[in-house]
Image (spheres, helix red, strand yellow):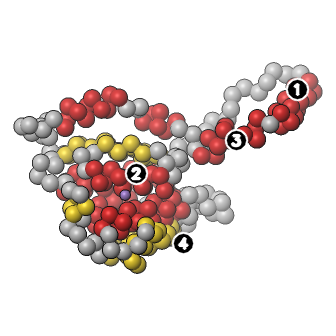
Amino acid sequence: MGLQHAGCRAHESLISYRKSLPTFGNLLAIPVPTSASSVSDPTLRKPGRCKSRKLSVHTAAAAVETPAAPAAPAPATARAATVRRSTKETNVEVSINLDGNGVCTANTPVHFLNHMLDQLASHGLFNVMVEAEGDTWIDDHHTNEDIGLAVGTALSQALGDRKGIHRFGDFTAPLDEALVHVVLDLSGRPHLSFDLDIPTERIGTYDTQLVEHFFQSLANTSGMTLHIRQLAGSNSHHIVEATFKAFARALRKACEPDPRRAGQIASSKGVLTQA
Ligand SMILES: [Mn+2]
């Protein structure tokens, strides 16, 4: 294995950690917010509501004299994908469910990026699982880049033919003094315009040059036009975190179904995927 390195125990610990994790099958099975909230909705336990529901079931059964209807309808096709990327520099696995509820499992050696992936999941209401190991004894560059590439590929696969989505997303997020504007288009055309002025070289051990590189990698493989503008900010952690929050909310909007589109592709050209 190309990633073994004298004195590096990350691989062993990664394997043991993986064994303790739920499978992504379970993660995919996590219900979307609407069904989750309906299960716990306290109004469903009101006696009057319960009673009327039972009554209507009984009446219907008596009228037709047939057994109860079988099984719930099959769920709609999942907008989810899993991508594995393996090179001599990194091993990365990313799973994303666009219709999730904000669950994130980010287990990579780039700890600040784990914190940012958590923003992507929780503010995008995606389920995101990222497992990665890489040659971080050199620096975080390869691992950061390959996670960005894999997230972008998973996003593109989960979107499929991109029918019926809003396509465009736009959000401005504050974090204390920082304010960052993100505009994106799931156009199939990779582009990044990046205008953050991050005042320090590092956030913890994370090289702040890697922020642009992460978004460039993600834009390239997802087929996304992405503009990032900093409107205010002086604290590096705040600026970058506001960027991921704004990105997550803009992406959530762009990915969500547009009911007026009725499953059509939001393009006068008729195609949003990359050639
Ligand atoms: Mn933070």
Decide which of tag 3 and tag 1 comes sooner along the chain: 3
Helix or strand or loop: what does disc 3 sit on? loop
- Circle nearer the viewer, 3 or 1: 3
Residue 254 seen in the current view: yes
- Circle nearer the viewer, 1 or 4: 1
Query: Disc 4 to disc 3, how far (Cα)?
Result: 42 Å
Q: Quadrant of residue 68?
A: top right
Is 209 left or right of 43, judged from the image as shown? left
Q: Report the image quarter containing ligand 1.
A: bottom left
Residue that mark 1 sits on: 58
Residue that mark 2 sits on: 118
Categorize mark 1 by other alpha carbons within 10 Å: few (<14), some (14-19), many (20+): few
Callouts 2 and 1 close, C-beta under 8 Å: no
- Amino acid type at circle 1 is His
- Circle nearer the viewer, 4 or 3: 3
- Relative vertical location of residue 6 with respect to residue 116 in this rendering, above or below: above
Categorize mark 3 by other alpha carbons within 10 Å: few (<14), some (14-19), many (20+): few
Decide which of tag 1 and tag 4 comes sooner along the chain: 1
Helix or strand or loop: what does disc 2 sit on? helix
Image location (x, y in percent) of residue 186: 45, 64
- Amino acid type at circle 2 is Asp
Query: Disc 3 to disc 1, how far (Cα)?
Result: 23 Å
Decide which of tag 4 and tag 3 comes sooner along the chain: 3
Residue that mark 3 sits on: 41
Residue that mark 4 sits on: 268
Q: Quadrant of residue 82?
A: top left
Residue at the image point whose x is 23% and y is 69% from the top: 200
